[in-house]
Image (cartoon, grey):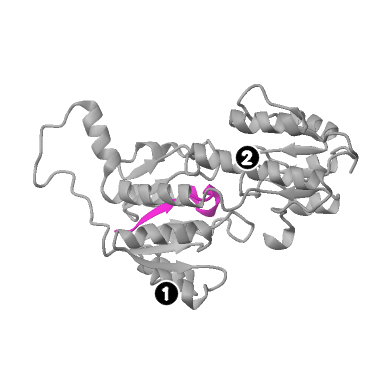
């Protein structure tokens, strides 16, 4: 690597501490507005920079990577998910990709558990009732939800986040079940008293709560499709804090309206900020604006990982959090 400072373009506003540190270490162009770059802006940035720091709101596809300048050598993603980056094309062009894994597991698991409680205990309905001022006082038959303890929780994706959800669920007395690409080691299963299901269909049909915690890849797109959603018990609820594309959102919405699924807690959506309008009007659905990892501590840790990946690359070494196609 040349001795001069790397040229780095950041596509979104990051915490001030992270931006300041980036500026100290590299020749950085920061984003003034906290809005996503247009495709034209991304293309221009990738023409001029050695390193680009995108977020999940930036689609770095094959076309953009193929048109990148010769200087671009690293895409240092601010976030763990890389489904918005064509990693294979980047690798073929000699461009490395890094991410920030393991940072948001605890924060996202907190949100998953919050959504489980919100839907089963009808918290959004209670909040709405209080905000309208129509509450007439306590009644023994009003706002009856369901007890979380004793329910079967089926975790779809038992990685860092899935295991963090399992720890929380155990504390609430839930029974932990899971489906994963690979079965966990016996000692890990024992830690969560977890039951492994090789068949996702069989697990889905028997659970009271489904928590989606797997990444979005070509193999997980619509993993919870209409056929599989219909296997759920009418009394079951589904929670998604992973990626919206894992669930067929339109099929889920139809089933919620028909009473074929009891409820849903969603922090992510199949089409980003464009949400099926019917979801907004159902009392048995809790919606959040993709805030599962939104803690100050988590955002700062993500920034530290981005800094470490770029600094390690600048020193002529492999970024510690490099992503390769075989990992996806």
Q: Which image quadrant: the C terminus?
A: bottom right
x and y, in percent, of residue 322 in the image: 72, 53
x and y, in percent, of residue 149 in the image: 26, 61
Q: Which residue sits at x=31%, y=63%?
A: 174
Q: Which image quadrant: the N terminus?
A: top right
Q: Which residue sits at x=83%, y=38%?
A: 50
Q: Which mark is residue 209?
A: none
**Badge 2 is on which residue?**
303
Q: Which residue sits at x=43%, y=39%?
A: 288
Q: Earlier along the polypeptide chain: callout 1 or callout 2?
A: 1
Residue extending farthest bottom: 186
Q: Magenta region: which residues?
A: 234-249
211 falls in the magenta region: no
Q: Is residue 205 left or right of residue 27?
A: left
Instruction: Using the image, determine if residue 141 lies above or below residue 196.
Output: above
**Residue contact between numbered discs 1 and 2, judged by CB atoms under 8 Å:** no
Circle 1: element type? helix
Q: Is residue 100 left or right of residue 188?
A: right
Q: Nearer the viewer, residue 20 or 144?
A: 20
Q: Which residue sits at x=48%, y=71%?
A: 188
Residue 120 visible here = yes
Q: Nearer the viewer, residue 215 or 313?
A: 313
**Badge 1 is on which residue?**
190
For the residue carrying disc 2, how many other residues have a C-alpha within 10 Å: few (<14), some (14-19), or many (20+)?
A: many
Q: How many marks?
A: 2
For the residue carrying disc 1, how many other residues have a C-alpha within 10 Å: few (<14), some (14-19), or many (20+)?
A: few
Residue extending farthest top: 32
Residue 196 visible here = no
Circle 2: element type? helix
Q: Nearer the viewer, residue 26 or 271?
A: 26
Q: Is residue 231 left or right of residue 10?
A: left
Query: How far apart are the alpha carbons under marks 1 and 2?
Result: 34 Å
């Amino acid at each position: 690597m040349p001795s001069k400072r790397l040229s780095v373009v950041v596509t979104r506003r990051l915490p001030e501490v992270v931006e300041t540190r980036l500026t100290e270490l590299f020749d950085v162009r920061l984003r003034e507005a906290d809005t996503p770059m247009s495709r034209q802006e991304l293309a221009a940035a990738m023409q001029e920079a050695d390193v680009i720091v995108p977020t999940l709101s930036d689609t770095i596809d094959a076309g953009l990577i193929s048109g990148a300048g010769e200087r671009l050598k690293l895409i240092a993603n601010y976030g763990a998910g890389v489904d918005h980056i064509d990693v294979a094309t980047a690798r073929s062009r000699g461009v490395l990709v890094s991410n920030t894994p393991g940072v948001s597991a605890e924060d996202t698991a907190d949100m998953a558990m919050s959504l489980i409680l919100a839907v089963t205990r009808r918290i959004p309905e209670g909040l709405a009732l209080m905000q309208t001022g129509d509450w007439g006082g306590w009644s023994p038959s009003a706002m009856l939800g369901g007890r979380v303890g004793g329910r079967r929780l089926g975790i779809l994706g038992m990685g860092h986040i899935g295991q963090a959800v399992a720890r929380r669920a155990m504390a609430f007395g839930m029974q932990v079940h899971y489906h994963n690409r690979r079965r966990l080691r016996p000692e890990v299963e024992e830690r969560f008293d977890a039951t492994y299901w090789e068949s996702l269909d069989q697990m889905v049909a028997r659970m009271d709560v489904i928590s989606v915690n797997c990444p979005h890849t070509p193999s997980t797109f619509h993993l919870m499709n209409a056929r599989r959603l219909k296997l759920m018990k009418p009394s079951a609820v589904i929670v998604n804090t992973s990626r919206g594309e894992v669930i067929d959102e339109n099929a889920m919405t139809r089933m919620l309206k028909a009473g074929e699924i009891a409820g849903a807690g969603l922090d992510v959506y199949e089409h980003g900020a464009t949400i099926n309008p019917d979801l907004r009007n159902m009392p048995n659905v809790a919606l959040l604006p993709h805030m599962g990892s939104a803690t100050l501590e988590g955002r700062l840790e993500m920034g530290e990982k981005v800094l470490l990946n770029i600094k390690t690359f600048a020193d002529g070494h492999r970024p510690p959090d490099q992503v390769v196609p075989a990992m996806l």
